[in-house]
Image (cartoon, rainbow, N blue to C red):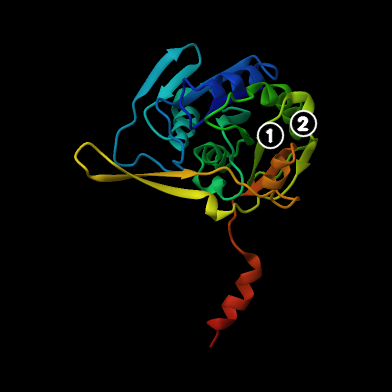
Amino acid sequence: MRILLTNDDGVDAPGLKAMERIARELSDDVWIVAPQQEQSGAGRSLSLTNPLRLHKLGERRFAVGGTPTDCVMMAVRQVLDGRPDLILSGVNRGANIAEDITYSGTVAAAMEGTLLGIPSIAMSQIGFADQAIRWQTAEHHAPGIVRRLLEAGWPKDVLININYPDVEPDEVNGVHVVPHGRRDQTAVTVDERQDGRNIPYYWIGLRRQQAMPPPGTDIGTIWRGGISVTPISLNLTDRDTLDPLGRVFQD
């Protein structure tokens, strides 16, 4: 099995090293094509107005001066000497849950792979900037989860999003297939500061959620120490609204 690895934290990120260790438990044919610089929050953006620079860093290891989506396109269409059988994106530093998935470059890379007809999985390890990230939790559980997913299979227009909780590997509270939830929007912050010339600038960030979210979603699952597995469809159409809205425009 040929596995392509990418991420949005950059080619030198510790999470990509964790993903490489995961992938090598599944196959010896592992390729890395990842952003040269961090691309967190890039979503599914493409570099349409700037040229892409490709840098070979070693055997089957490349950096692209662009977004995660750029990396997948370059890997499949330019770099690899054959299509990958699986794309693994991550392991992201921090959660990609709830509405994060629409911002996430990690999820976007898996989405691009899915559009190209390649089974794709995004992975994220929950953690916070002021503490050590428990990469060992993702590394311990991911190979078995990926094997079971590949054995079962999933629809060609669906990607898989996995989040690992901020607990030790032996403290994980099961693997749960759940829909994505909604964040408490009071956790979103805009921090105003001033530079050396007294001109304001701003940082967008997230506070840690204080209240326990309800169970049955990705955010509720990881807060209770479980691993969340969420299938995400590429078709964003709200079919329940099609007929009622269509009747609005009927003559």
What is the three-letter code of the residue carrying label 2? Val
Q: Which of 45 and 141 is in front in this view?
A: 141
Q: Mark 1 points at which residue?
A: 165
Res. 121 image quadrant: top right
Image location of residue 192, percent across then percent down? 35, 47
From where the camera sits, is residue 45 visible? yes
Q: Position of residue 154 (x, y in %)?
A: 72, 42
Q: Farthest residue in the bottom direction?
A: 251
For label 2, the residue is: 172
Q: Residues within 10 Å of mark 2 (few under 14, many from 20)?
A: some
Q: Where is residue 31 in the image (x, y as percent from the top left)?
A: 54, 20
As helix, strand or loop, the secondary structure at mark 1 comes to loop
Could you say whether the residue bearing mark 2 is in a helix, strand or loop?
Answer: loop
Residues at marks 2 and 1, CA–CA distance in whole angstroms = 7 Å
**In the image, residue 114 above or below residue 128:** below
Circles 2 and 1 in contact, beta carbons < 8 Å: yes
Give 179 or 209, whichever is nearer the viewer: 209
Above or below: residue 114 compared with residue 169:
below
Label 1: how many Cα within 10 Å (few below 14, some 14–19, many 20+)? many
